[in-house]
Amino acid sequence: RQSAVLELECRAHARAIEAKHEQLDQEFRDLERREGALENQTAHMKQEQSESEQAFASRAACEEASIRMSERALAELQTELSAQRAALDSDVWALADERKQLGIRIDLEKDCHRAEQ
């Protein structure tokens, strides 16, 4: 009779151990699923970060190219402006010389006109 009680206690204990084992197995599978989900999420975030970095690098390269183009255009405009300024200065000096010559001719004509009178 004592052995029957002992056997029942052993079986109950064995069922309790088996139930605990199943519970731990289930918890382990849940943890594995969560780990897999976290690994996927991490991989996805790394992919997004990589894409973001590539997009940033691409935008930066475009902006640098745009800046270089603007700088070249500015240099060309400055060169053209300097040439136009030099031409304008030349025209101003030529006009000043013409004015001076015209003034001298007018003075001579006045002198001649006075002398004729």
Image: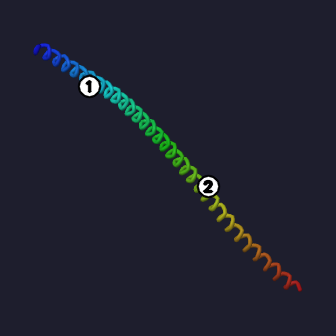
Q: Residue at x 33, y 29 (%)?
A: 35
When asked about the image quadrant of residue 93, the answer is: bottom right
Residue at disc 2, secondary structure? helix
- The circle on residue 3 is none
The answer to whether 87 is drawn above or below residue 9 in the figure is: below
Task: Give the percent coordinates (x, y) of residue 17.
Answer: 21, 21
Q: Which mark is residue 24?
A: 1
The residue lying toward the viewer, choosing from 108 and 40, is: 40
- Position of 82 with respect to 34 (left or right) is right
Q: Classify residue 48 by image quadrant.
A: top left
Q: Which quarter of the rendering shows the C terminus?
A: bottom right
Quadrant in which residue 89 is drawn: bottom right
In this rendered view, identify the residue nearer to me: 95 or 108.
95
Residue underneath mark 2:
80
46, above or below 66, in the image: above
Is 107 left, or right, of 52 in this rendering?
right
Q: Could you tell whether 63 is left or right of 88 in the image?
A: left
* Residue 11 percent across, percent down from the top left: 19, 16
Q: Nearer the viewer, residue 101 or 83?
A: 83
Dot 2: few (<14), some (14–19), or many (≥20) neighbours within 10 Å?
Answer: few
| Residue type for callout 2 | Glu
Q: Earlier in the sequence, mark 1 or mark 2?
A: 1
Residue located at (39% from left, 35% from top)? 46
At horizontal 17% and vertical 16% (from top left) the residue drawn is 8
- How far across and how far down the image is residue 55, in percent? 48, 39
Q: Quadrant of the N terminus?
A: top left
Q: Nearer the viewer, mark 1 or mark 2?
A: 1
Residue name at image x 36 percent, y 32 percent: 38
